[in-house]
Amino acid sequence: MSAFLAIVKLTCRSALRSRVFQLLLALLVFTVIALPVSVVGDGTAHAHIQVSLKYCLGTIGFLLSLSTIWLGCFAMGADIESYQIHMVVTKPVSRLLVWAGKFAGIVMVNGSLLAISSVLVYSLVLWQFNKRSFTESEKSRIRSEILVGRRVFMPELPDTRSITDEIYNRHLEEAAKQGKKMTETEKRYLRLEISKRVTASMGEVLPGQNQMWLYKGLNKKNRTPVFLRYRVFVGKVSSKEQRETMGIWATRIHIMQKETPSDPDGTGTYLRSVFSPRTNYPETIMCGVFNEIVMSPMVIDEQGNVVVAFSNFDPQRQTLFFQAADGPKILTKVTGFLGNYIRGVFVIFIKICFLGALSCSIGGFLSIPVAIFSVFGYLLLGFFSSYLIGIDRKMASMGATSGDTFIDTLGNAVSRFLMFLLVPMEKFEVSSQLADGELIEYSYIGNIIIFNVFLKCAVILALGLWIYRRRELGLVVRK
């Protein structure tokens, strides 16, 4: 145990003496102190708190990731290249103990910096919230939308692929009746166009018409307000020329109706579902930005479902669009800001542990520059593979076929194989969720730890330790 603690102590001391680490530490101090008081967002109090929280945590996570990668590769490679490890292994100290001590020292240094910086950011955000001259309405909005942890519910969407298949087959039958022969390229293009129209129609609201969304799985015993978060676009989603529009939101509620035509249970009442509009007249809505409305918990029915509807009363009679990624979302409060903030910081700490293990494993059998390059190559492969898999899933959800050519099939297979082995870094990015007041679920954290760290990192960790233990140190000669 004393040998392990000695290695940890020496690793921490070596880290603090590193010039690269000192530079990253200076950038970290600047981030913690300067960013919370310098960012302004769009000028509103809501955006000021939101942007400062998002930018600070995102930058802290990025800088500590760089620090962990550098220290991990440097701590393992420098001892070997400077022959210090030769004196250690001659003593009754196993290489596994050396590796564990260096890993623990790196995690201790960066974990301590994470704890200190996250506490400072939390304190500065609350200081700004309490000391700045925000109005009571602005503070109320910040409390309900940012300084909170709210569970997110996305709407239940129909199977777009089956709908696309049905329309696609109908077009093929009509073409066959007319004697038209379509090439495979024409069929693929037709299917893509149909899938785009089907997907767009799910969030499309024509002038004078309405669109409904169903949400499942809410707590039917919930007694706190229910929030509806949405963003609507006018004309085209890609258009930057967004303006104000008008519409009416309505929610389905259940009421007891009297004087029934038939009275089977003898009570004289029955349960009736009706849509209750939020306003009696169309309200003004700004397009292209996120909006939130507060609803009564009574909108949750006995099955834990919520149904909302939106009617388009655009004054210029243009079609309105809702993106699938934006929901609209239903949010319910689960915990306070501190509890959700701690979860977010813990996710960043998990990333530090993962990068520390990865860097130490690769740094144990490669030189420092090659090890750093290899770690960044690993992270880039994970990023591009997840990007390609995301495109493939998007195409599949639209009803488009993938793998029509050998190159498509090979590329998709390679991407999926890499995703099976690699850990995508976007899984650790939770600053946006914290800034939006969205709850970081325990199930999400557990999934990261079990499937994205333990299972996937175990292969590289075991391989790196095996090579490090069997590495012939006598062959490492300075030229």
Image (tube, helix red, strand yellow):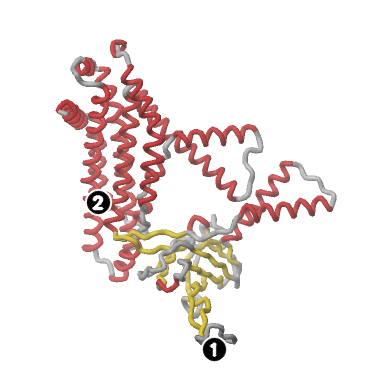
Nearer to us in this view, 183 or 320: 183
Residue drawn at point x = 45 percent, y = 33 percent: 421
> 241 or 432, which is in the foreground?
432
| 285 relative position to 465: left or right | right
* Nearer-N-terminus badge (2/1): 2
Find disc 1 in the rendering and name its residue.
259
User: Residue most toward the left?
Assistant: 2
Q: Amino acid at mark 2?
A: Val
Which of the 4 quarters of the picture holds residue 469? Answer: top left
Q: Is residue 7 left or right of residue 285?
A: left
Q: Residue at x 25, y 35 (%)?
A: 23
Q: Find residue 412 and report its image quarter.
A: top right
User: The residue tagged with tag 1: helix, strand or loop?
Assistant: loop
Residue linked to disc 2 = 121
Q: Circle 2: is it few (<14), some (14-19), or many (20+) Cα within 10 Å?
A: many
- Picture layout, residue 397 above or below residue 359: below
Query: Where residue 179 sits: x, y (%)?
Result: 85, 49
Q: Is residue 360 visible?
A: yes
Quarter placement of the C terminus:
top left
* SS state under label 2: helix
How far apart marks 2 and 1 lie (CA) works out to: 60 Å
Amino acid on which disc 1 is placed: Glu
Question: Which image quadrant is residue 333 in?
Answer: bottom left
**Which residue is at the far bottom?**
259
Image location of residue 74, percent across then percent down: 28, 26
Viewed as shown, does residue 222 lie left or right of 316? left
Residue 294 or residue 306, whichever sits in front: 306
